[in-house]
Amino acid sequence: MEYHNPVLLKETVDGLNIKPDGVYVDVTFGGGGHSKEILRRLGPNGKLFAFDQDEDALANALADERFVLINENFRYIKRFLRFHGVRSVDGILGDLGVSSHQFDVPERGFSTRFDAELDMRMSQKNDLDAYKVVNEYDDASLRRVFYDYGELKNAPALSRTIIEARLHRPIKTTDELKDALAKYLPEKVRNKVLAQIYQAIRIEVNQEMDVLKEFLEQSLEILNPGGRLSVISYHSLEDRLVKRFMKNGMFEGEPERDFFGNYSVPFKLIGKLIIPNEEEIKINNRARSAKLRIAEKI
Ligand SMILES: C[S@@+](CC[C@H](N)C(=O)[O-])C[C@H]1O[C@@H](n2cnc3c(N)ncnc32)[C@H](O)[C@@H]1O
């Protein structure tokens, strides 16, 4: 089975405006689709660093002298680039979220299609997993996860139901979780609600919102002036953070005004929001929720 079919491949790499001698970073290597395209456009003196926190992605490493794959979380992008002697870069690409491989391997627990132990860790080194979230979080914490990350209005009821169910015995598998929540999963909305529940737990397990914020802030620090940031997100929570950060250089509030009363912002937005066309969605269903934003450091 194919590891991952890259989404908005041309558009995302076009967004980097690649200079043949430049230094680039692909923070979500996965199957390496975007990385291969970056390398194709780089000259012999160009350099590409890639990150993926999933050990499985290491098997896709590219045999190319210009390429280095780092098996770490991109929340540490600055630290690990510095370890490789790199303090500034010309472009950073992020294709957020989960790979098709992660969805397709039942034991990883990401897919609503299979029964599996509650896991959902993108990195095998992660301490927190879905079992701990479901079985050890208190009512307030579970509610927050479902409400904030799943945008589930009935978060309090879901949380209470899980807490009651696990009083009898731990909830060990995704099927046991589905059984415990069965009354909130009527046939008509089952898939949609399950997707929201899974998304919420996955975001919590991988701390995706905090990680994204830390990554965006460090990207701004390490990009050279004129350097590009090209980011694909797959749900509105991610996209909101990316959009605000590219527009204002911050996640909340308004940027400061300069001496002349103009907002002082760190990025110039490049083009408008890009989404895949129908043709791409037809051949790659994972592309359906993709949103690409591109910005250039001023
Ligand atoms: C959507 S896939 C990327 C696919 C890739 N662009 C391709 O063409 O094959 C996302 C990948 O990023 C990795 N990932 C997600 N969040 C990460 C993080 N915080 N740090 C490092 N890797 C991460 C996942 O393990 C996954 O392999």
Image (spheres, grey):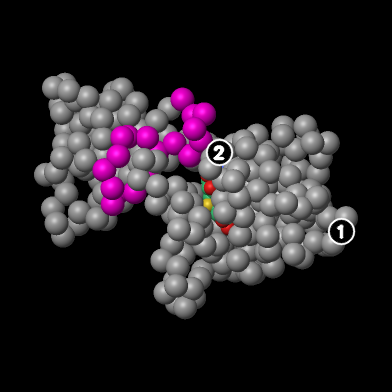
Q: Are there few (<14), some (14-19), or many (20+) residues within 10 Å of tag 1?
A: few
Q: Which residue is mark 2?
A: 55
What secondary structure is marked by label 1? loop
Is 92 left, or right, of 104 in this rendering? right
Please tell me which residue is depicted at 28% across the width and 52% down the height of the picture. Answer: 113
Along the viewing direction, whichever of 285 and 181 lies nearer the viewer: 285
Q: Which residues are magenta?
A: 110-127
The quarter of the displayed image where residue 278 is located: bottom left
Query: What amino acid type should be assigned to the residue bearing mark 2?
Result: Glu
* Magenta stretch: helix, strand or loop mostly: loop
Place of residue 283 in the rendered image (x, y in percent of width and height, measured from the top left): 44, 72
Q: Which residue is mark 1?
A: 44
- How far is the residue under mark 2 from the one under mark 1? 28 Å
Does mark 1's beta carbon lie closer than 8 Å to ligand 1? no
Ranked by sequence position, the earlier of labels 2 and 1 is: 1
What secondary structure is marked by label 2? helix
